[in-house]
Image (cartoon, rainbow, N blue to C red):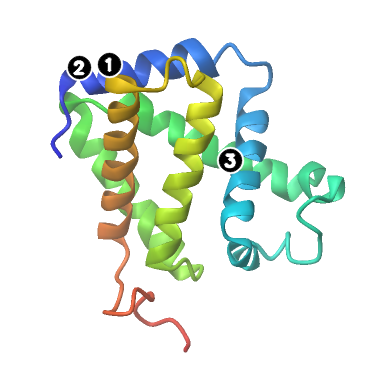
Amino acid sequence: MPISTEQAKIVHDTWKKYVIPMPDYHKVMGVWLFQNLFDMDPQVKKLFHFAKDHEMTSDELWHSHRMVSHVKNVISEIEMAVEMFEPAQQQALIDNLRDLGKRHVARGVLQSNYDTFGDALLKLMASVIGAQNFHGDVKTSWEVFVKHVLDVIMEGAEYDSLGRGVGMAM
């Protein structure tokens, strides 16, 4: 589905209205996103060497320097995509996202992991924006945003017919 200027505006405006005012939003949103992700697919946790030795409910995991740093970086990348999610900035966004795909396939991220990540992000945004506001054009705009971002990330990564990164060990 093509990106409309109105959808880009809705994504940007809802991020600005609901996320940015949140105290320490990079950390809070990031922890919440990864809690959703690990709840939806506990196997994904194995991709994070710094998380392997912790229970998913462990405060030690969610407060560890490595985890906090990672989740903040992920939210910063999402924020960058939100800010660049408009037709005028599409090429720069595409270049950044394709590079992100290359880096993630090298770390063992499977093609199927992106669907779970997308679902976790949409669940997060629905919670933050609230059910009373996350419907209609707002929900559709976020779905288009997430699909576009993840499709472009996967373009940057090379996957075989089984959804595994090319060159990954079997």
| Residue placed under numbered mark 1 in the picture | 9
Mark 2 Cα-neighbour bin, 10 Å: few <14, some 14–19, many ≥20:
few
Side of 156 where 130 appears, left or right: right
Mark 3–mark 2 Cα distance, whole angstroms, equals 26 Å
Q: Is residue 11 above or below residue 114?
A: above
Q: Which mark is residue 6?
A: 2
Mark 1 Cα-neighbour bin, 10 Å: few <14, some 14–19, many ≥20:
some
Side of 142 where 62 appears, left or right: right
Name the residue: 64% across, 37% down.
32
Q: Tags 3 and 2 in contact by the CB under 8 Å rule?
A: no
Mark 1–mark 3 Cα distance, whole angstroms, equals 23 Å
Q: Position of residue 70 (x, y in %)?
A: 63, 46
The amino acid type, in three-letter code, at marker 1 is Lys
Q: Tags 1 and 2 in contact by the CB under 8 Å rule?
A: yes
The N terminus is located in which quarter?
top left
In primary-sequence order, the first of circles 1 and 3 is 1
Q: Position of residue 160 (x, y in %)?
A: 29, 79
Q: Nearer the viewer, residue 129 or 46?
A: 129
The amino acid type, in three-letter code, at marker 3 is Leu
* Secondary structure type for disc 3: helix
Q: Which mark is residue 33?
A: 3
Name the residue: 46% across, 15% down.
132
* Secondary structure type for disc 1: helix
